[in-house]
Amino acid sequence: MKKTPLMILFLLTILVVAVAQDIKKLPIPTPAQLTWQNAELVAVFHYDLHVFDGKQYAQHENRITPVPDYNIFNPQTLDTDQWVKAAKAAGCKIAILTATHETGFALYQSDVNPYCLRAVKWRDGKGDIVKDFVESCRKYDVLPGIYIGIRWNAFLGIHDFSVSGEGAFAENRQKYYNSMCEGMTNELMSRYGDLAIVWFDGGAHGPEKGGPDVLSIFEQHQSNCIFYHNTQRADIRWGGSESGTVPYPSWGTYSYPFSHSTNQEVIFKNDFQLLKVGDPDGPYYMPAMSDAPLRGINGRHEWFWEPGDDEHIFPLENLVDMYYNSVGHNSSLILGLTPNPDGLLSEPDVQRLKEMGEEINRRFSNPLASTSGKGTKFSLNLKKGQKINQVVLAENIEFGERVREFLLEGKTNKGWQTIFEGSCIGHKFIHLFDDLAVTELRLKISESKAEPQIAAFSAFYIEK
Amino acid sequence: MKKTPLMILFLLTILVVAVAQDIKKLPIPTPAQLTWQNAELVAVFHYDLHVFDGKQYAQHENRITPVPDYNIFNPQTLDTDQWVKAAKAAGCKIAILTATHETGFALYQSDVNPYCLRAVKWRDGKGDIVKDFVESCRKYDVLPGIYIGIRWNAFLGIHDFSVSGEGAFAENRQKYYNSMCEGMTNELMSRYGDLAIVWFDGGAHGPEKGGPDVLSIFEQHQSNCIFYHNTQRADIRWGGSESGTVPYPSWGTYSYPFSHSTNQEVIFKNDFQLLKVGDPDGPYYMPAMSDAPLRGINGRHEWFWEPGDDEHIFPLENLVDMYYNSVGHNSSLILGLTPNPDGLLSEPDVQRLKEMGEEINRRFSNPLASTSGKGTKFSLNLKKGQKINQVVLAENIEFGERVREFLLEGKTNKGWQTIFEGSCIGHKFIHLFDDLAVTELRLKISESKAEPQIAAFSAFYIEK
């Protein structure tokens, strides 16, 4: 058969369509997910009645024990500006506040949950910390997010989403509680402007599980916002630990539209392997987040302020290590911060966050060489005898995680040497290695979905 | 044996001691009980969230169903002066307000129960109806009382004093709830000055039944006040119906120190006979109260305002009949009043209360003859041809209910005629009978504990 120009055009069309379909299948982030991934560092502020009880926080006991006197809530020098500035100094671009947590107490002026700042004497019952917090975020150019805990409520007797008791009384109260949760969601979604993320602690059972319909309320008010999470939807997934890290690789795509609200047998097995690693062929873009409380060293793990807990603030070294194993593994690092009973982030926390921000700046602000572009082969030239010990790779994930296999090599005085053989790059891949003198670095992408779009290929030398 | 003066003195001493002991055994009212009995007419104002829901009140359903939106509480023209004036016009000398009822919602600024007037938008969350009410009472010289409902709480899931659920969660919440009830009692007992009565709806389980210890808090703050009621103490007893009446006789003394909180098999039998009749030999002074809602005719019985319920206000005739069968039977009449969603007692209620007060005044203000004093025989002289149809008897109950059997006779033109053979007089006995022309009336007390102390023996002629 003679190949006519028409036939060539026909074959080319088939090829283009095939490639386009392949690209089309590749999950890409929404604008809200892009913002989230680009933020890299996120602070989540935990603040609740237990901060004021002068005791160690005991989650299991607290979940089933109402705080005896809610008027212990009395942060005399509360200053959300101070909180947000401290988070920003660490490099956080998003900051989240627990509007409610497991006591059920709400840090704002709710019209549907009387167990809120209206109830206390503090600020004559007029305080609204969610409002203060969101305003501080906007003032310091940090994107605000809101955390809503509805899974537990020690005050109202809610255990794992369910009203305690039996029969018609429990059924009626469940209906009431669901409606109250919807009402709080509506208030929090509609009163404080655009949010970067709404985080339902432990997920939010939907109506399919006898829970409130919070998703539709969220969707009505926040069209450009991360939803985390329920059985229908999760825009990020939990990274499978509260260590502030994920393993390598941790793909930004996932097998299910939900994080871990359901199908737990599969998702939880092998120490949450699927949550940690993700699914390179998964149809949902849903990157892993790596959360950890700042106060989590020496056998402690404290999301809530406790007396005498300053010594449990992670040393800088650990925080930097977390950064490499979260942001450097295509994840985001969520740092749990908790203001003290005075209403301020304690000075040692503020200091450590500042040190962290400075150290990250020091490590990533001055590449020796950098390039970007489309294609499968990239190289960086370095001056002779230049030692390097860190490479940062980044895909332009607006177009999806295209890279599936890559090789990173350096040209030493003994010739080309493999530095790293990898798979996932995604939003960011950071590799730290022993000092190596190279005159050239090259990145070869041997497998990809569609043409790789490399946003950064940078080499660094970090003084240790 | 010769009777010497010494021996006579000795025998006299024995006699005096015996009589004194007999008197000593006779239960007498406390000053608070005296005030209560003298008040005769008492108003109890019921006001709660359900007044605002535009529906018929359905107690059984409401007990187990939280009100969907507590911001329906919005009485735009609330005026407790208007309430108290209306009650006073009927003749009420004590007025009680439901600080909390079965929803659990508190009509004041509680620091321990967030489900209160702090929670609502009404008056910017600063309303305190208990305060307004007590101040109105003092302004119009009516003694204030407070009703506290802790037996049911639809919001918090309390059913018959018990927290719904099981295990440690229910135990911890029960402890919390008990403490909250103690806290509310403390607030209500300490913030509003001296009270005439504190009424715990359905009683208050004490610690012996796993409930709060409200009695000791009451005793700490209110030394001259009716306590109604728990298993340890009741200063009045329920009269065994909500008909606004008790039968004759209804003794002011009772067999137990509690009303009906316990020993229910004995107390409830034979249609609450013991509560109704009392126990003439009972060791506790605890008169029966006769309660009824003003809106209780034509098959309705409404403690709470409902739309379209004006037609169920008792006609004057029924209210007067109630008066005779409560106040006239040594009991007190407790009228249930319920302000409307505007915050006012509706005009038809106000009008009926005014009519009631006027009619009672008309019937009891102008005795034809009256006497009082100590002894067993009393008489009243009337002018020849004078018709009478009503006699009022009263003991000075400060000294106890001494009269046990009496005969009331009238001297007609046919000679002495029996008008009534009775037993109990107590605080007040009113007898209404067919017109009878007498020139003399006499009261013979044939049996008594110690010397009778008659506060009033009065004859009336009432135009019918």
Image (cartoon, coloured by chain):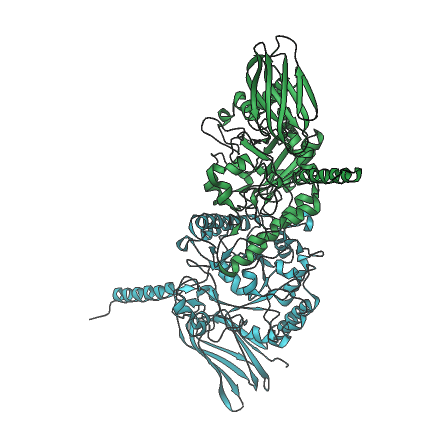
Chain colours: A cyan, B green
Residue A55: x and y in percent read 64, 65
Residue A385: x and y in percent read 59, 87
- In depth, the one of B231 and B318 nearer the eye is B231
Which image quarter: residue A273?
bottom left
Q: Residue furthest right?
A: B5
Q: Can residue A197 be seen here?
A: no
- Whether residue A147 sits left or right of residue B196 in the image: it is left
Residue B284: x and y in percent read 62, 41
Q: Can residue A440 be seen here?
A: yes
A53 is higher (above) or lower (below) than A117: below
Which image quarter: residue B228?
top right
Quadrant in which the N terminus of chain B appears? top right
Q: Residue furthest bottom?
A: A414
Residue A375: x and y in percent read 44, 72
- In depth, the one of B431 and B347 nearer the eye is B431
**Total numbered circles:** 0
Residue in the picture at 44% in, 76% down = A423
Q: Residue furthest top?
A: B385
Quadrant in which the C terminus of chain B appears? top right
Q: Residue furthest front?
A: B1
Which image quarter: residue A447?
bottom left
B88 is higher (above) or lower (below) than A168: above
- In depth, the one of A411 and A218 nearer the eye is A218
